[in-house]
Amino acid sequence: MNQTHLTAPTHFVEVNGDRFAYRRWGNTATDQPPLFFLQHFRGGMDHWDPLMTDGLAAGREVILFNGRGVASSSGKPRTRIEDMADDAASVIRALGLSQVDVLGFSLGGFQAQDLTRRHPDLVRKLMLLGTGPRGGNPDSEPGVAERAPRPIPTVDDFLYLFFGRSEAAKLAGRAFWERRHQRKDQDPPSSPAVMYAQIEANVLHLPRLSEDDPFAHLRDIKQPTFILNGVNDVMIPTVNSFYMARNIPNALLFVYPDAGHAAQFQYPERFLQHAIQFLSE
């Protein structure tokens, strides 16, 4: 039977003494490399949208992944984005892959950029969703600091943090919330240690590498790059997507209307159309 987001088993690969959890499924009868997913703050494999993952898996393999110490992976959580990126590279190689496409959302987008810069041979194409560059604009809305670290986020927290403000956006957000909880054997939630480690990593990620040319490092990314955000991202301000699009040499920028941090979850069908075209062309 063909596996899906709801049925793909959790596997583990050991790297440097720790066990990294991953799920892998999709179309293997294609010349497309696997698409490797890097998740948002505190998020695990079950925080992705099944419409998104299964839609992309129709044309390629997809690999969901938990970083060191995150959810069902073992080990001490990382406190530096560079180390998270190196862990992802080690897992990709441990899976016997010589090249992948990479999709990073939010904190995962920070990791995806460093993975691409530090291990360029591993990455064919790059997708950056709801994220920003090192040294970008950090001015999230005040409500983010209250809601994002909440021990057990509610649907209202997700609506505020991830979606647009219209009634249609809220309906789309609640539909995502239902899809996101369909899998029966859900990943365990990430520990408080993960939250504190990732907050520290975010703080260390804030300073600019250079005041004279703060986004020069983005020009090291030569891969075709897909950038997506909502028009009003309350967590990582949308202007950061423009900074990336202006400095990554081969970047394509999408800004979805009436959307926030997780535009891909609010408009899954639109996102799939754009993403599949980008990955296949």
Image: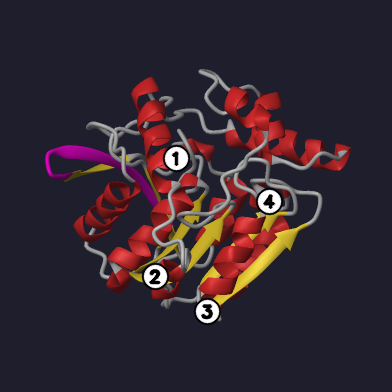
Residue displayed at 66% across by 30% down: 142
Which of pointers 2 and 4 indicates the residue nearer the eye? 4
Q: Position of residue 152 (x, y in %)?
A: 54, 18
How many residues crowd around disc 2 within 10 Å: few (fewer than 14), some, or many (20 or more)?
many
Residue underneath mark 4: 263
Query: Of residues 88 and 137, which is closer to you in this image?
Result: 137
- The mark that comes first in sequence, 2 or 4, is 2
Query: Of residues 102 and 215, which is closer to you in this image?
Result: 215
Check disc 2 and report its element: helix, strand or loop: loop
Query: Of residues 72 and 255, which is closer to you in this image?
Result: 255
How many residues crowd around disc 1 within 10 Å: few (fewer than 14), some, or many (20 or more)?
many
Name the amino acid type tagged 2: Pro
Residue displayed at 87% across by 37% down: 167
Residue underneath mark 1: 45
- Residue 33 marker: 2
Mark 2–mark 4 Cα distance, whole angstroms, equals 24 Å
Name the amino acid type tagged 3: Asn
How many residues crowd around disc 4 within 10 Å: few (fewer than 14), some, or many (20 or more)?
many
Range of residues picked out in magenta = 15-25
Question: Residue extending furthest top?
Answer: 151
Residue underneath mark 3: 250
Q: Indicate the quadrant where residue 276 lies.
A: bottom right
Residue displayed at 52% across by 38% down: 47
Horizontally, residue 111 falls left or right of residue 264, namely: left
**Disc count in the image?**
4
Residue 29 can be seen, yes or no: no
Image height check: is 170 above or below 96? above
